[in-house]
Image: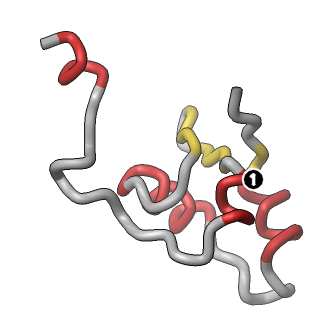
Amino acid sequence: MTELTTHTRANKEFFARGSAPSRKQWCEWIEQGAIRGKVIDGKPYVDANHFAANDFLSPLSEAEQVTAMDLLR
């Protein structure tokens, strides 16, 4: 099971003061699939273990993006 942390905690853990991404940026990265996590009621929660373990994070291609509806088809 993946454990999620708040984006503010991820900012404190991984970024120097003044260089941390905004809440909006975290939400965009999660929605694009670049970062593993969930956006719940506009608040980003980050898979900090996955973020820490990977040096290269990029958005998923359209072929890699699978929604719950795709799985039901």
Q: How many marks overall?
A: 1
- Give the answer, above or below, for where 38 lies relative to 34: above
User: Residue sitting at 72 percent across and 79 percent down?
Assistant: 20
Q: Quadrant of residue 39?
A: top right
Q: Of residues 22 and 45, which is closer to you in this image?
A: 45
Q: Residue at x 61, y 61 (%)?
A: 23
Residue on which the image places disc 1? 49
Give the image location of residue 58, x and y in percent. 41, 69
Residue shown at 54%/42% (left/top)? 42
Q: Residue furthest left?
A: 73
Residue 55, compared with residue 10, is above or below; it is: below
Secondary element type, mark 1? helix
Q: What's the amino acid at mark 1?
A: Asn
Question: Closer to the camera, 40 or 32?
Answer: 32
Name above or below for residue 29 compared with residue 20.
above
Query: Looking at the image, which residue is at 31% across and 57% down?
Result: 60
In which quadrant of the rendered view does residue 34 lie?
bottom left
Q: In which quadrant will I find the C terminus? A: top left
Quarter occupied by the N terminus:
top right
Task: Estimate the x, y position of residue 47 in percent, counting from the top left.
Answer: 68, 48
Residue 30 is situated, as x and y percent measured from the top left of the image, at 48, 53
Q: Residues within 10 Å of mark 1 (few under 14, many from 20)?
A: few
Relative horizontal placement of residue 43, taking residue 59 as reference (left or right): right
Spot occupied by residue 3 in the image (x, y as percentages of width and height): 76, 36
| Quarter of the figure with residue 70 | top left
